[in-house]
Amino acid sequence: MIISDVHQGITKHKRPKRIGRGIGSGHGKTSGRGHKGDGSRSGSRSRRGFSGGQMPLARLIAKRGFNNNQFAAKILEINVAALESKFDSGATVNPQSLAEIGLAKGRFDEIKILGNGELKKKLTVQAHRFSKAAEAKIAAAGGKVEKLV
């Protein structure tokens, strides 16, 4: 059987390294563990983040300051242009309808409607927060703004 030059040396499934099968295998005797030392004996495992004796990255980076991000409210921002494209005139926009249509994905605490884009459809929009521009555009289109608590 002749193998073409293109596929020579390329194997789909690489065979596992057979450890401890004699010196002829190249992985006999100490089986790649060396003599004595930290990883030579069974049951040895280096801890997570161990960098082989040098200073671990977690200890190199300065531990300074306070970050409020974990406590801050996660706010989902939606522009009026998205409401224009996804909703029909006369529809009610609320967290449930936004989730059904695919605009409200993931975890969030509040929804804020922003005023980027044009709105020509009459919509009843229920959200936690509104920008001034968004409120003006919804009112100008004949819609209604309802703030959720």
Image: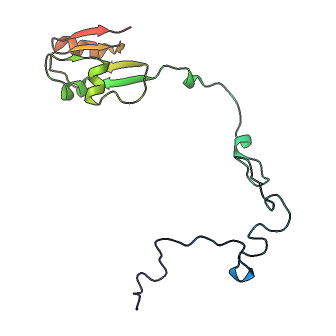
| Left/right of residue 51 with respect to residue 74 in the rendered view | right
Task: Report the residue at 15% width, 19% height from top.
Answer: 121
**What residue sits 35% from the left and 9% below the top?**
148
Q: Position of residue 8 (x, y in %)?
A: 46, 83
Q: Looking at the image, which is closer to me, 55 or 118?
A: 55
Q: Is the C terminus in the top left, top right, bottom left or bottom right quadrant?
A: top left
Say if 125 sits above or below 16 in the image.
above
Please say which color scheme the image uses: rainbow
Count of numbered circles on the image: 0
The residue positioned 79% from the left and 53% from the top of the image is: 53
Which residue occupies the foreground of this view, 40 or 141?
40
Outermost residue, bottom direction? 1
**Which of the pair 45/121 is nearer the observer?**
45
* Quadrant location, the N terminus: bottom left
116 on left or right of 7: left
Rendering coords of residue 66 (x, y %): 65, 24
Q: Position of residue 72 (x, y in %)?
A: 52, 20
x then y, percent, for residue 84: 19, 25
Q: Is residue 123 left or right of residue 47?
A: left
Q: Residue 94 sits in which quadrant?
A: top left
**Residue depicted at 74% across the width and 52% down the height:** 45
> Left or right: where does residue 38 sit relative to residue 79?
right
Q: Check the image and name the residue furthest to the right.
A: 36
